[in-house]
Image (cartoon, grey):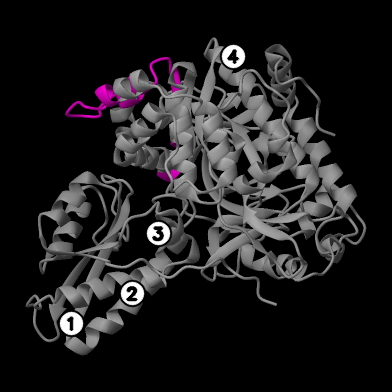
Amino acid sequence: MLPVFDPNDNEAGLKLLEDLTNNACQIQQQVLEEILATNLHTEYLKSFLNGDSGKENFKNKVPIVNYEDIKPCIERIANGEPSSIISAQPITELLTSSGTSGGQPKIMPSTAEELERKTFFYNLLVPVMNKYVDGLDQGKAMYLLFIKPEISTPSGLMARPVLTSYYKSNNFRNRAFNRYNVYTSPDETILCSDSKQSMYCQLLCGLVQRDEVLRVGAIFASAFLRAIKFLEEYLKELCSNIRTGSVSDWITDPNCRNAVLSILSKPNSELADLIEDECSGKSWEGIIKKLWPRTKYIEVIVTGSMAQYIPTLEFYSGGLPLVSTMYGSSECYLGINFKPLSNPYDVSYTLLPNMAYFEFLPVDNNHKEVVPDVQCNGVSVTDRNGKEKVEAVDLVDVKLGHYYELIVTTFTGLYRYRVGDILMVTGFYNNAPQFRFVHRRNVVLSIDTDKTNEEDLLKAVTQAKVLLEPLGFLLTEYTSFADTASIPGHYVLFWELKMRGTNDLPELDPVIMEQCCSIVEESLDSVYRRCRKKDKSIGPLEVRVVTHGTFDALMDFCVSQGSSVNQYKTPRCIKSEEALKILDSRVVGRFSSNKTPFWEPFRIET
């Protein structure tokens, strides 16, 4: 059972967090007992546990799994077989992950009870912020929130992103009034399926209510920066709407339109002139504080791949704190930042012990994984190849400064599932460890919710090589980086090309090279292509061709920084500014994709 508390009662919320973190060990044991007792007779657990729901039996018999291991079970449910394959509770929907399998989004099971758990989690964010920031009940939040495409599976269950699931739920739409969480955006604008109309209307409402806004934000830093660019592009039209008290004709969603008109209410030339004046300077540095002068902070996720946006956010923020409040995933919600005003580069999250049963697979200091073993009872052993195998450790047994991969057993039918997040233990809050999110396992490129790994990048580049090889071109080396200097950001690939049999640089036909860019994009996964085509959260992919010897110079630089010559491998993603300068100084041609890749909502295979 989830603890009950009034989200308007800060003292009760903080006391609850103290109780949860002080009793982390006992609560984790209770969570595991509840999950196993409830689901012991599911087809999945029955095949391992033979009716024994003890913790030792669970750890010895139930394997640590990746998505590919459980994908058949989830797809069977999506195709109409009973939830009891993995869950004693009815699976009520499937949540699409930003991670992919076979080029399509992973899908995770969810239940009605899990929505209650998410609501409980969101309500706990409020007292933490109120502890550090006064007066949040004296105004509104301009949070830019959006829904994304969903599909109906053969079973009739909807498959949708986790945030879309929450915003469309009764838990969100019929939420109780909370004086600390009043939004400038009407629900109708958040639930508008047209992302452009949604963005326009939410910004318009936020501008009209500028004097009431105490905090601004979006879920991810990338989304908030896209909103700033959108504001810049549509500023005149937004001000015209404010000046006339009307909404542009292209806003055709009737619910959206009516909700905005109720807020506009009347013409306001004075406000329109003020906004235009604030935005008329040569630079938009500090524009957030200028447009919303009462704002106390910007709430966006800036951990993991989103950290690349911190400098740009700081440029626009006018010195406002950047706050990352929570850590969650499609599998389950996980942790809260108990020091929300900390430096954005130093954010740590405290995992709440009642959200799921957590285990941690040790990884070495270079974040390389070890082989999980389900039958070594905590003793390090080796496999037949001599590779070390270790047991996953419990939440309260992790060690300060050590790196781990997160494993979850959820209330919704995932058992010892590898989430893929690499975390570092930074401290403890009472008896609950705190973690810094380091990165996603195997991910090399990410701009928004896309996560491209080294294998996917290789496959995409290999497809483009097919176009070059008949021309006598050889792609001798490549690397990449996520360019976030522009909004939206985009992938950049550095290619070293030569003619077969020589070291001469081939003559580069722009048409052919642009086709190469397009082929790479078409070969990347569904989430990337959705971000490009539907969400427009990623810009066209770019290929920069470099001179012969560039990657030798890159190797020399890496060796000078401590890499071993004997063990050196070309990094497939570049993060060092010095390394990027070496590559950029040798660029002889730049080419970009001139069309958006094909995308359609994924389908469940029957």
Question: What residue did someone put label 3 on?
Answer: 532
Question: What residue did someone put label 4 on?
Answer: 137
Marks 1 and 4, the one that precedes in the sequence: 4
Question: What residue did someone put label 1 on?
Answer: 473
Marks 1 and 3, the one that precedes in the sequence: 1
Type of the residue with mark 2: Ile
Q: Which residues are magenta?
A: 276-305
Type of the residue with mark 1: Phe
Report which quarter residue 521 is drawn in. Answer: bottom left
Residue 400 in sight: no
Q: How many marks?
A: 4
Q: Indicate whether residue 477 is drawn in magenta.
A: no
User: Would residue 336 appear left or right of 48 to someone viewing this image?
Assistant: left
Residue 137 percent across, percent down from the top left: 59, 14
**Relative to 518, residue 277 above or below:** above
SS at mark 1 in the image: strand
